[in-house]
Amino acid sequence: MNLKNRNLISISDYNKEEYLYILKLAEDFEKNPVQDVAKGKVVATLFFEPSTRTRLSFESAVCRMGAKVIGFSDASNSSTAKGESLADTIRTVSCYADLIVMRHPLEGAARVASEVATVPVINAGDGANQHPTQCMLDLYSIMKTQGTLDNLNIAMVGDLKYGRTVHSLVEAMSNFNTTFHLVSPESLKLPSQVKMHIKRKNLKYFQYTEIPDVMDKVDILYMTRVQRERFLDIQDYEKVKNSYVLDKSMLINCKPNMKVLHPLPRVNEIATNVDATPQAYYFQQAQNGVYVRQALIAAILGLK
Amino acid sequence: MKKELVVSAIKNGTVIDHIPADMLFQVAKILDLTSRNTLVLLANNLDSMKLGKKGIIKCQDLYFNQDEINKIALVAPSATLITIRDYEIKEKMNVGIPSYIEGTVKCYNPKCITNVEKVTPRFDVIDKSELKLQCRYCQKITKKETLTFL
Ligand SMILES: [Zn+2]
């Protein structure tokens, strides 16, 4: 498997074998996180919009591999603020770095960057569109907790209409004979464009409106937030808002192997009394992000 | 019996036939015919076996490039393009919706990079009959109802 110089813009840029290769590398980094394999390399982290969590996760990954980081954490102190085009910024940074990690508020920005960059580009989020490294770390967390990605029952809970992490995860997990349990308010159901990925593989999906309906059926409960702004009518939001909050008391009849995942940051959709239960896995999930990003950087730089 | 011509013939140029009647002015608009300094003849609501009512456009000394033909195809996929030389039909072709479109249509997504930076929009046509164009950048789908031309 050779992923050297490959961009990672969308989860569909990589196939099933390539996901599995990255997950295997990540496992290796988890066992041995400090590996000087990227010594002398420079990774640019270009955050045209702030995202402290994602940036620190990437920078931690880079540092643990012995490489150096250049970049900015906010477009207001970058050349973009002076009116430079995205393409020109990327062309310039290509001269300074071996790899570009970028986050941008506009959808499709990372794809544009990959077309002009002379070094590979990793998309760390382009607006509401894609955030493929989040998806990779979700896959890794599922594999770590279940021992496999194959033949699982996965519940996706919350805002399934707008949640980009949900869309990518459905697309990626459709490669592994997953049965999907989709729990959302009526108005925030999974879009048909995303359901196509499930249908194309002849997989099953079921739709629900209440979390307890899936509790005894699933191996993974993937929580996302239902945001007030997504409702046209505030009364509709008030009616459903408490249905999408996971509380410890709801876990009583869950399967013994069941784990709760969440892309973080959490607001109130998982009660803090869940944190100490054996089902809570969302903080380890964030930790896994560093290993997965190490694996991706190593593979794309051609070091592994 | 020879059919009488409703619109007089042109010597050289292009005839766009079989335009659905309700799309005639749309086609004229996207080809920017109002600002051309040449003879342009339009006729609408002509009887048509194929369409019921059709429109036809004749353009003296005008020939269309692939980009313009793509635009015609998007609003009037039934149209026929006829090239005329010295009053004779030189070439006849059906416009067809291509599977890939570049630089013709705007992405409907206001948060798409192509609407903010100088980036040529590019689309894969994922459904020709319903006309659904998927943006290669933001991946959002521009539909017939949200179609605007650059
Ligand atoms: Zn777009």
Image (tube, coloured by chain):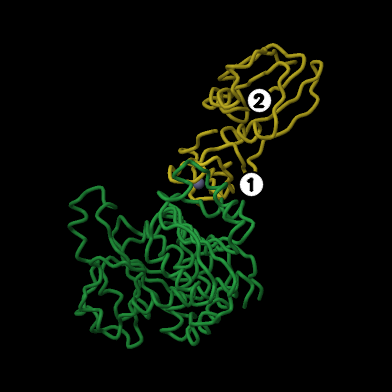
Compare residues A21 and A300 and report the one nearer the observer: A300
Q: Position of residue A66 (x, y in %)?
A: 53, 76
Q: Residue at x 57, y 47 (%)?
A: A87
Q: Residue at x 48, y 57 (%)?
A: A46
In the visual, does B54 lie left or right of A128? Answer: right
Q: Chain of mark 2?
A: B
Query: In the figure, what tint was chain A given?
Result: green
SS class, disc 1: loop
Q: Decide which of tag 2 and tag 1 comes sooner along the chain.
A: 2
In the visual, does A198 lie left or right of B38? Answer: left
Q: Which disc is residue B99 wearing?
A: 1
Q: Chain of mark 1?
A: B
Q: Is mark 2 within 8 Å of ligand 1?
A: no
In the visual, does B38 lie left or right of A125? Answer: right
Q: Position of residue B16 (x, y in %)?
A: 66, 25
Query: In the figure, what tint was chain B given?
Result: yellow
Residue type, mark 1 in image: Ser
Q: Is residue B45 above or below residue A127?
A: above
Q: Residue at x 77, y 21 (%)?
A: B84
Q: Quadrant of residue B42?
A: top right
Q: Residue at x 50, y 86 (%)?
A: A32
Q: Which residue is mark 2?
A: B17
Residue type, mark 2 in image: Asp
